Image: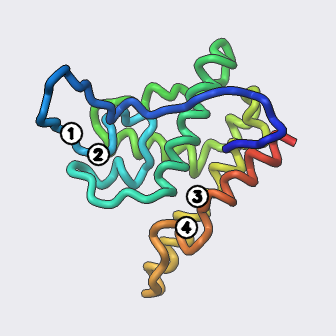
Amino acid sequence: MVDANDHSVGVLIDLDIAIHVRDGEKKLSFPPAPGGTYAFRAIDILRQGEPVTKVFYRHDLESFMYSLMWIVTHYIAPDQEDRFDLMAWDQEDPKGAASSKEGVIIGLAGEISSWPLTDGWFPRMARLFKEGRRRQFRATQDGRDIDEETYGGFITFESFRAILDDYHS
């Protein structure tokens, strides 16, 4: 997300799927995508198991939200008494990590809104993904097709960015 009027500089990259290339190496082997850090994977990706067959842009947005939460809890509010322990997200069982994340998205968003920097953006992001999942569930129950990529146009770059822009203004 780039704003020509904002001179802040930063880079967020995903090195989970990076590979080491040795001099002269002709054949490269790639790990199955996406990367292996459960703490940052989208809930749907964790529930799929390996090999992952469906990856959507909304998964990247959800993953970015978890990255922001991790940064806030580990670097901005490390001594906050009521901070949620995100280490439960980084366990060996992907389905357990998914359940832990669902607890935050569905039930705990209000409780952690007191963390620094999360008073505006985190509850709104959590509601965005919660509502998207609810829309998908209802469409499935009603026998309607829904665009899986964006949950029917609900979770998009624009809807995600609007939350960050509102917080930033």
Q: How is the image coloured?
A: rainbow
Q: CA distance from mark 2 to mark 1?
A: 8 Å
Q: Are marks 4 and 1 in contact (CB under 8 Å)?
A: no
**Label whose residue precedes the other's in the sequence (4 or 2):** 2
Q: Are marks 4 and 3 in contact (CB under 8 Å)?
A: yes
Picture coordinates of residue 19, whole percent (x, y): 27, 30
Q: Is residue 101 left or right of residue 18?
A: right
Q: Position of residue 121 (x, y in %)?
A: 73, 43
Q: Give the spatial CA distance, label 4 vs label 2.
A: 26 Å
User: Which kind of residue does numbered mark 2 sit on?
Assistant: Ala
Give the mark nearest the N terminus, 4 or 1.
Answer: 1
Query: Mark 2 or 1, which is nearer the eye?
Result: 1
Which residue is denoted by mark 1 in the rendering? Answer: 30
- Which residue sits furthest bottom? 143
Kindly report the distance in space between the C-alpha atoms of the residues bearing marks 4 and 3: 6 Å
Q: What residue is pinned by disc 3?
A: 130
Instruction: Identify the residue at image location x=63%, y=15%.
Output: 78
Give the number of the mark in front: 4 or 1: 1
Residue at screen point 84% across, 39% down: 5
Residue annotated with mark 2: 33
In front: 27, or 75? 27
Q: What amino acid does circle 1 point to?
A: Phe
Dot 3 or dot 2: first in sequence order is 2
Task: Give the residue type that dot 3 points to.
Answer: Lys
Mark 3, Cα crowd under 10 Å, few <14 / some 14-19 / many 20+, is some
Residue 156 horizontal/vertical position (percent): 61, 61
Question: What is the C-alpha distance between the residues marked 4 and 1?
Answer: 35 Å
Q: Which residue is mark 4?
A: 134
Return the residue found at the far front: 24
